[in-house]
Image (cartoon, rainbow, N blue to C red):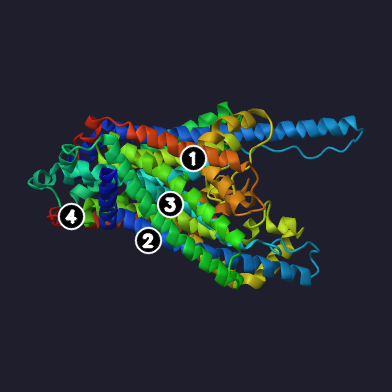
Amino acid sequence: MTSTVVIARKELLDLRRNRFLIAILCFILVAVVISVVVSAAQFRVKFDDYTTYLNALRASGSTATPPAPQLFPLQLMRGSMEYLEILGALFAIVMGYGMIAKEKQRATLQLIYSRPIGRYSLAGGKLLALAFAWLAAVVVIFAAVTATLAIVGHAPFAGIDYQRLVVAAFTAWAYLLLWSAVALGLAAVCKRLSTALIIALVLWLTVVLILPQIGDTMDPDNQVPGGLFKSLQIAKPDEKAVLANFAGFDTIRNALEVSSITKHYERFTFAILGIKDQYNQQSLATVWSGTWNNVISLWLASIASVVFAVLSTTRTKLLRRTS
Amino acid sequence: MSAVLTTARQELVSLRRERLPLVLLVVFVVMVSLSSLIGWLTNTTVSNVWQKTVQAGLTKAANPFADVSALYYARNTVIYLVLIGALMAIVVGVTSAMRDRKARTVDLILSRPIGVSTYLLGKLMGIGAWLAMILGAVAIISWTSIAIITKAPLSVSDTGRLAGFYIIALVLLLVFVTLGMLSGIYSSRETTALLVPISIWSIVAFVLPQIGTSANPVSLLNPVPSVKVPGGAFDTMNTILSPLSVTEQFKTASGLILNDSEVTGNLATALLVIFLALVIGTVVLLDTRRDLIRGALRD
């Protein structure tokens, strides 16, 4: 057994024994499940309203039948995906940071490096453990969400829906691993642990909350309740023609949004799950052709963060004396 | 009284030296300063979009921003207070409660004739003064930015409203300070101390409003409070949970104070909830047992 695997096994054992981490993972699980239950209940309310409206039409003698609201089960996962995007990233930072912090605080690094381990074994082992831990967490979260959709939402699944769920789960895994790897790398590279935590938290705040929020705020269509163009009663083709005159503004807005890796994760998962109407019930190939840049950006960023973590978690950096 | 003031003064000195609150403070001040500019840019673009559609004969609707209030440009500050401000307040509370425990100076301080409640009240007052100075500076920046954008100084009434908004913001931030301090006192690890109140903040800011209104988490990053779904279980849940969602109550109070036409609700109820949260937080904090404050840290 290589030293990398030994370290990974030890980390997994530590993670399993860490009641606080189990608690925060349970917290995410509860939040995503609640979100699905709320979305299902909201659909029920919408359907009841439709039935009431239809009955009123019938009572008034009308024969017109307005289209009934259609249930697309994966669309009920919007809130769950957003919880993973916001809270998942935060807890991923804690997990990654904690892996190095505990070694520094307990002064166990000297002991580990007194053994004949490879140059990148410590980083490799810890990242391997994080990858396994997040894979297990994502599988549990998506299984719980799917079960909730089936039981509470009475949602019928098509074969393609399971494929979409698997792709979305892998994307979530890459996103969460990215944040853990960044935090792990920062905890290793910074002399003081508090500095690493500061940088990680500010990064989270900026990338996950502030940049997407600015992008949303700058979207002209978001400025009026129900949408600007709807309030002006402008059709979609005309909307595009008008917005073409503001390409510069929209480029800046979009650039701000795509500078956040969270937005890439959001755009792809919303497309693959059909949450974004444009991609609802579309084939995986159509989704890929419209969002491949988001997928590539997310995976490149994840790989880059893992490489950063591996290269920064070295003996020289870890055994530096803190000032 | 002098013991409270001495502790408050010491807290102010310590806060000046802490790095994490200072970094968050910089992010907060920059974002609040930019928020008026972002609001103005967007407003101008929407007005230009409207002008284009009118010229093209696509609409006869009125410009949605024709009679927008000058205080409209301060509306994005609401969300930065809920996001960055609340997190900054939590971090300040946690670091304040843990500082003396980490340095083991708490034993020395409590060996002097000073009660636990006096010591904690002094800390809370020190942080309150620090936050008041920051919000005062931010209010001046907001006032100046709006005056530059609208090319006119704010009226006395609008200035009063802006001041009122920042006073409510101070109360909200103090609620999160007490939460952070309590977590810093009760936790034995720094990471846990930070994460517990951040988790509570995420429940208050995202989970509770979602259960009551079915709004998705990202749509809650909006200065306008989420609208409840009328009738049925959501209405009941909203009635039960909305008083607990201090951040949504803050959005309601801020929107009404800043004359935001999109915001509806009861100002008195919103203010009552925010003030009550501070009173409860302060009472629980000042009731802390001596042995808890002196508890050793595990990392």
Q: Which of labels 3 and 1 is toward the front?
A: 1
Pointer 1: what residue? B275
Pointer 4: what residue? A314
Q: Quadrant of the N terminus of chain A?
A: top left
Q: Amino acid at mark 1?
A: Phe
Q: Which mark is residue B26?
A: 2
Q: Quadrant of the C terminus of chain A?
A: bottom left
Find out whether the residues at labels 1 and 2 contact each other: C-beta distance under 8 Å. no
Find out whether the residues at labels 3 and 1 contact each other: C-beta distance under 8 Å. no
Q: Amino acid at mark 4?
A: Thr
Pointer 3: what residue? B85
Q: Which of labels 4 and 1 is toward the front?
A: 1
* Residue B232 drawn at (x, y percent): 67, 29
Q: Is residue A306 left or right of residue A219?
A: left
Q: Amino acid at mark 2?
A: Val
Q: Amino acid at mark 3?
A: Gly
- Circle 4 crowding by C-alpha within 10 Å: few under 14, some 14–19, many from 20: some
Q: Chain of mark 4?
A: A
At numbered mark 4, what does the secondary structure look like: helix, strand or loop? loop
